[in-house]
Image (spheres, rainbow, N blue to C red):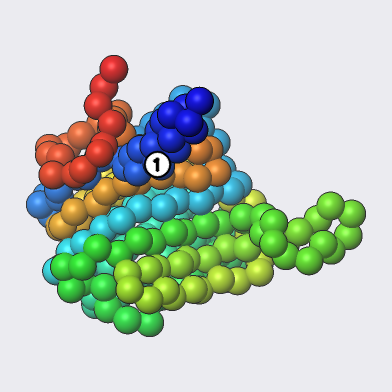
Amino acid sequence: MILLPIFLYLLTVGVSAIKGPCFSFGGTAHIEFEPENFNISYSAHYKLEFRTVQENGILLYARGTHDYEVLYLFGGKLHYLIVNPTPWGAGGTSGDYFQSDEKVNNNTYFTVEIFRNRHNENSPQLTGNARLIQTGMTIKATQEEKHVHNIELRGLQIITPVYIGGDGAKTDTVIQEFEGEIRDIREKRNDLVFEYPSLNGGVPRCVATNHRRPQ
């Protein structure tokens, strides 16, 4: 009878230690994920780990007909940009933007979370069952940075695929495809680990511990 609780504890620890795969980017290719029944139009919450020595590069990119969101490095700092243009063009664009306080291109693994239109369950109740809606970015290595706005972004229409390591277009000569490692990529709202790309432009897996294997 004593062995059963110990076994269940060890099983729980083992499951929680499982990470998503690690991908090694050389600055010339990206990967794409297009899961089924995966809705990121209005709200999304991504989490990933990365390390690099490069100053510029795209980590995550998603878009719709006009809207887009992108997590990228520029000048060694991490940036998260969401753009929601209106049909009439200039003067009507909305969205949000965040930038890290410190540079993150020191070859150390950083954990970053980006989220838009996330319901904050820890916020005080407003009216009825309503909670604060937040958009922001958190970054952690040894210390944690938090950049959060209590704001609802309306009118977004973002769809799959989700691009990792580039934007699939190679149209920007400044912010180029990522060079370094990205691992344990997740979309927490849909409880999904990005494991098997729907399209791989030539990105190999790097050495990662405890990642899942195909059944």
> In the displayed structure, does residue 7 sit left or right of residue 55?
right
Near mark 1 (Cα within 10 A), the count class, few <14, some 14-19 or many ≥20, is few
Residue 157 in percent (x, y) is at 56, 45
Task: Look at the picture and state if 189 lies above or below 178.
Answer: above
Q: Quadrant of residue 207?
A: top left
* Image location of residue 201, percent across then percent down: 17, 37
How many marks overall? 1
Question: Residue 74 placed where, x, y %?
Answer: 27, 72
Instruction: Give the image quarter of residue 72.
Output: bottom left
When the figure is inspected, residue 145 is found, relative to residue 17, above or below; the finding is: below
Q: Is residue 16 visible?
A: yes
Residue 83: percent from left, percent from top: 50, 61
Picture quadrant where residue 70 is located: bottom left
Furthest toward the bottom, the residue is: 101
Comparing 55 with 22, the one in front is 22
Q: Nearer the viewer, residue 4 or 43?
A: 4
- Return the residue found at the far top: 215
Give the vertical position of 17 relative to 48 (above or below). above
Image quadrant where one finds the C terminus: top left
In the image, is 210 to the left or to the right of 143?
A: left
Specify the farthest residue to the right.
Answer: 128
Residue at position x 51%, y 51% in the image: 45
The reply to whether residue 133 is in sight is: no
Of residue 48 and residue 63, the one placed in the foreground of this image is 48
Residue type at numbered disc 1: Val
Q: Residue at x 44, y 59 (%)?
A: 113
Residue in the picture at 17% in, 64% down:
52
Mark 1 lies on a secondary structure that is helix
Residue under the image location 19 percent in, 44 percent down: 208
Left or right of 42: which side holds 8? left
**Residue under pointer 1:** 13
